[in-house]
Amino acid sequence: MTDTGHVTLALDEAGIGIISFFHPSHNSLPGAILNELAHTITQAGQDERVKVIVLKSEGERTFCAGASFDELISIEDKEQGLAFFSGFAKVINACRTCTKIVIGRVQGKAIGGGVGVAAATDYCFATQHAAVKLSEIAVGIGPFVVGPAVERKIGLAAFSQLSLDATEFRSAEWAQEKGLYAEVFDSVEEMDAAVQAFAAKLAAYNPEALTALKQVFWQGTEHWDQLLVERAGISGTLVLSDFTRNFIQGFKKK
């Protein structure tokens, strides 16, 4: 484990696979962490010992701050931009194609790509501190890669609100009302107890039935392997704009 962040997978006796990610900058996601996270989700889905997956981040304040600004500012051409944003596509598609149910645990704010990660889970728990914001258009990029996953969960109208009102957070209660979160709790302790109880319940169910049900949940998304990469190309081009570079440099000077 280093200060550059990490991803871990732990398996308990009940067959609950707990995938945790961490980055010291508010759990932002550089390319290396995105790729490792996607690989770990896929790996857990292929492990017969794993009955259900819990996806979480470490720390207390922020679930995920989205794309790493340090990495965004270092992108020099469209190819690098495509490669970086394809990392978010890989994580969403890993959750989508994983044969196991993925439970989200969102303890704090979810921003940009963090909203996409939460939306890619099959059932998501949160605390009252888990406000959401899609800040991409303010940065000059737009939520193109995470958009399909977010829209699938909360609908086009709510996705449009989040996308255009890019500087304002929506509360965890708003996110629950729109369908992003299944349940919202006052404390992390209450949420964790609920996550553990729900995961244990699912782990005892017929795994074949759960896999078949998950296929029903994600029906109609079979084209996402191509769609999300195409969307990554849009973001990968926009990140090279003067608008985006000036915004990020200004933000980092604050």
Image: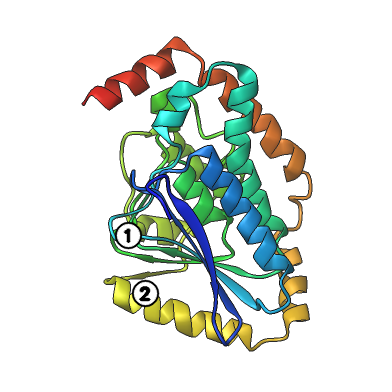
Q: Which residue is mark 1?
A: 59
Image position, residue 120 (x, y; %): 58, 55
The answer to whether residue 192 is above or below residue 238 is below
Identify the element where label 2 is drawn: helix
Q: Nearer the viewer, residue 209 or 87?
A: 87
Crowd tier of the residue under label 1, counting other residues whose Cα lies within 10 Å: few below 14, some 14–19, many 20 or above: some
The answer to whether residue 131 is above or below residue 70 is below
Question: Which residue lies most toward the top here?
Answer: 242
Say which amino acid is labelled 2.
Met
Q: Which residue is mark 2?
A: 191
Task: Kindly indicate whether the residue at mark 2 contacts the one at mark 1 (C-beta within 8 angstroms).
Answer: no
Question: Which residue lies most toward the left here?
Answer: 254
Image position, residue 48 (x, y; %): 73, 77
Residue at 57% across, 87% down: 13
Say which amino acid is labelled 1.
Gly
Identify the element where label 1 is drawn: loop
Residue at 52% across, 22% down: 75
Q: Nearer the viewer, residue 216 or 8?
A: 8
Q: Which mark is residue 114?
A: none
Mark-to-mark CA distance, 1 and 2: 14 Å
Image position, residue 104 (x, y; %): 50, 64
Residue 11: name its quadrant.
bottom right
Tell me if I can see residue 31 in this picture. Answer: yes
